[in-house]
Amino acid sequence: MGGDRDAMADLAVMSRRTAQLIPWKAAGRVSEQLPSGDEVVRSTGWVFNNATGDDLTLAEFVATGDEEVPAYLEVFGLRGEHTANQTLIEIGAGIGRMTCAFTREFGAVIACDLDQGFLERCYEAVGRFGKVERLRTLEVADGRTLNIAAGSADVAFSYITLQHCSVDDALDLAAEAVRVVGPGGRIALNFRGPAPSDVLLVPAGKLVRALYRLPGLGSWATRRRRLTRLAWQVSRLHPDQVTGPLGPHLSGIEVWTNPNSNLRGYGAEMRTFEGINPAHWWLVATVV
Ligand SMILES: C[S@@+](CC[C@H](N)C(=O)[O-])C[C@H]1O[C@@H](n2cnc3c(N)ncnc32)[C@H](O)[C@@H]1O
């Protein structure tokens, strides 16, 4: 308990620039202390897939990733005869919901996350449900830089992560995705687009993140699902804000949305897939 209090005091002094990292760090510390992956899914699994319940299991949690991964790889054209010899970098892997399936598809997987506690759980999940000999983990200590050599992977993939970063960090991580795959590599990056509800949600998110930094209250707030969901409302990016800076390094730029979305990207080929959350969009492209 003493350690827990110290950890929360550390979180409270995180700067305003990094306040959006606090709920992940807090959930990561809880997950480190729990005795099993099943317990982690029951206690903190909601930070990944929004499911709650006393009878949730790690197996069910990983099964949701097992369904999504092949679908996205197929739809985005990332699955082919060479996949088994390729390296995939997953930005924001969490406790391995999708990573297990990635290790069955790719010859090597580098799971990157802000939180080392999540990455340890990811390793454990892949040990049970994936091919752990293909997995490497990488802590993204500053939330914006991948400590990996340029051109060291074939595919960079990120799902429900960049929307939780500040705009600057999300753009930096997107640029890092381009750098680490290098020419010929493919990127598939998921973002949340602007919406009318942002008028309320974005300021509410800022308010909760300010609360996180208050001693005592912050620790309490990080364990409240509704508050945390508000605090997650960090960045909305229009496709042009991403393709503007990255466009010169990309070819075959596709912006994927839900068929009901009105979002359009300048100079991008617009594609739709009904499996995409209506508030989200994906940038899929080849690095030149
Ligand atoms: C909603 S979870 C998604 C996890 C996984 N992609 C999935 O679909 O289950 C977001 C993950 O992104 C990580 N994350 C948030 N901000 C990050 C950053 N700046 N750099 C790296 N990881 C980050 C969190 O720690 C968390 O594990």
Image: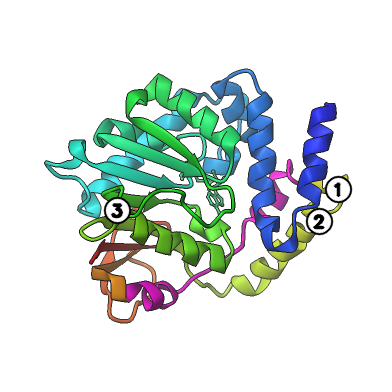
Asked whether 237 falls inside the magenta stretch, the response is yes
Q: For mark 2, what is the residue?
A: 211
Residue at 53 percent across and 47 percent down: it is: 140
Q: Residue at x 68, y 58 (%)?
A: 18
Q: Check whether the beta carbons of the residues at disc 2 and disc 3 lie within 8 A of each other.
A: no
List x then y, in percent, for residue 14.
75, 53
The residue at which mark 1 appears reads as 217
21 and 261: which one is in front? 21
Q: Is residue 212 above or below residue 52?
A: below
**What is the magenta range?**
222-247
Horizontal relation, residue 160 to residue 154: left or right: right
72 or 213, which is in the foreground? 213
Nearest-to-viewer mark from 1 and 3:
3
Eyeballing the image, is 53 above or below 12?
Answer: above
- Tell me if residue 226 comes above or below residue 115 in the rendering: below
Quarter that holds the C terminus: bottom left
Callout 1: helix, strand or loop?
A: helix
Mark 2, secondary structure of its residue = helix
The residue labelled by disc 3 is 151
Q: Residue at x 62, y 25 (%)?
A: 54
Q: Main secondary structure of the magenta part?
A: helix
User: N-terminal of the two: label 2 or label 3?
Assistant: 3
**Residue 43, located in which quarter of the rendered image?**
top right
Q: Which mark is residue 90?
A: none
